[in-house]
Image: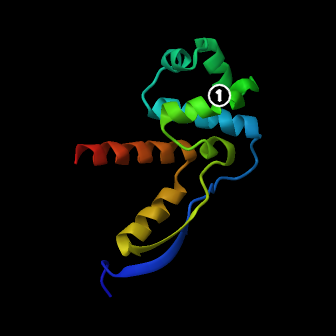
Amino acid sequence: MTSLQKHQTKVILQETEGRNTAPAMELAKKIGALRKTSGMSQEQLALALGLSRSAIAAMETGRTSSARKHIPMLARIFQVPSELFVSGMVEKEVPMTLSTDEVDLIGLYRRLLPEQKVSVQKSIERQIQKL
């Protein structure tokens, strides 16, 4: 069988990282990773949210519990679903046919840390925009 052979599979997008970290710290990591991947400074994000730079720093280190109230605006700024902040990834069953190469890419992607996944997603989006 060739590497171009298609595989029928049910794809479920879900968070795969462990649950050993407090939810506030998970949210803090996601905000920081998305900001960095988007190429924004803390100052720029603060301006977009109408907050101070120190408030963003507190959000990214989990020192404040006010981050949750900013999730809808953060989702708009970073162009991601709000669910990403709450549950990690949007869980949705998507039936599709994948090539062997695509299956390999998904396997590699699942090994990445959350901030690396965001970086890969943004990189792919930039490549698509160039087409």
Q: What element carries label 1?
A: helix
- The residue tagged 1 is 70
* Rendered image quadrant of residue 4: bottom left
Q: Position of residue 83 (x, y in %)?
A: 63, 46
Residue 119: percent from left, percent from top: 44, 42
In the image, is 84 to the left or to the right of 5?
Answer: right
- Identify the residue at horizontal 45%, vertical 24% (top origin): 40
Q: Looking at the image, which is closer to me, 55 or 111?
A: 55
Q: Residue 77: image x %, image y %? A: 50, 30
In the image, residue 108 above or below residue 118: below
Residue type pointed to by label 1 = His
- Answer left or right for 26 relative to 47: right
- Identified at 22% across, 48% down, the residue is 131
Q: How crowded is mark 1: few (under 14 residues within 10 Å), some or many (20 or more)?
A: few
* Rendered location of residue 68, percent (x, y): 71, 31
Q: Give the quadrant of the N terminus.
A: bottom left
Check the image and report above or below for 89 versus 31.
below
Q: Which residue is drawn at 61% across and 20% down?
A: 56
